Amino acid sequence: MVRARFAGRADVFAASELGFYFERGNRKALVVPDAFVVFGVDANPDLSYKLWEHRRVPDFVLEVVSRRTWRKDVHDKPGLYADLGVREYWLFDPYRTRRDGGAVLEGRQLAGRDWVPVATCATGDGFVSAVLDLDILVARGELRLRDRKTGEIVPNLTESIDRNKQSNKRADEQATRADEQAARADEQAARADEEAGKSGLEALRADREAARAEAAERRLAELEAQLAKQQR
């Protein structure tokens, strides 16, 4: 959804379950966020994200909570992400596996070195991501992003594919209609040429008939003149 939202920008890197190495030479200094977004870097994907190469800490990190990881996601990772300078940290618990009574969706933003809750969105059904400039909410058990100005839900992968199919279908239909119109125009032009040819042929015949009539009249006049001369 983030990639769809920022498809027109080459400086937004969005990845899921990609290794994030944050200390050069230490392969154990690794975390694999379920999703993260970095602004101001090349959007081309890579096999891993190395902090010393890109020199940009992820701005947005989201972890999907599971029975195996929820304690690390809730208690351990926030401190690491705060030390690194991640601006927003989000937890999504779609199957309610947390045992600490936490919410299905929780967002935190970094204030100094501490995390504070993100603001609730104006409609009250989600939260505001200042980093993404989007509302984040849960609809029918699914995490969704919403444009804060228009209220439009950012399409997910399935919806994007469907929209592309519909767009391609409309383009094909328009191309077919254009081809049909061009074919009709060609037929009309051919008929017009045929009519013009017939008109030209008829005009030629008329000219020939007029010429023969004129020649016949001249010949008749000559014969009449000869006859009159003989009678004198």
Image (cartoon, rainbow, N blue to C red):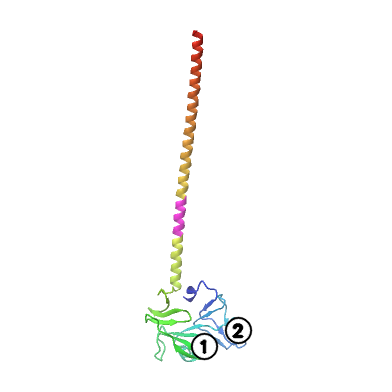
Q: Position of residue 7 (x, y in %)?
A: 50, 72
Main secondary-structure element of the magenta-colored stretch: helix
In terms of secondary structure, where does tag 1 sit? helix
In terms of secondary structure, where does tag 2 sit? helix
Is 200 located above or below residue 123 in the figure?
above
Q: What number is the disc on residue 92?
A: none
Say whether residue 181 is magenta: yes
Q: Where is residue 122 in the image (x, y as percent from the top left)?
A: 38, 81
> Could you tell me which residue is drawn at 54 percent across and 88 percent down?
84
Q: Which residue lies furthest to the top in this view?
A: 232
- Decide if residue 141 is on the left or right side of residue 35: left
Q: How crowded is mark 1: few (under 14 residues within 10 Å), some or many (20 or more)?
A: many
> Could you tell me which residue is drawn at 48 percent across and 21 percent down?
217
Q: Where is residue 192 in the image (x, y as percent from the top left)?
A: 46, 42
**Marked residue nearer the N-terminal end (2 or 1):** 2
Which three-letter amino acid code belongs to the residue tagged 2? Trp
Q: Give the range drawn in magenta.
A: 172-182
Is 103 located above or below residue 158 in the figure?
below
- Decide if residue 24 is on the left or right side of residue 97: right
Q: Residue furthest front?
A: 232
Q: Are marks 2 and 1 in contact (CB under 8 Å)?
A: no
| Nearest the eye: 165 or 189 | 189
How many numbered marks, from 0 up?
2
Mark 2 to mark 1 CA distance (whole Å): 16 Å
Q: Residues within 10 Å of mark 2 (few under 14, many from 20)?
A: few
> Could you tell me which residue is drawn at 45 percent across and 49 percent down?
184
Q: Where is residue 138 in the image (x, y as percent from the top left)?
A: 40, 80
- Residue that badge 1 annotates: 81
- Residue that badge 2 annotates: 52
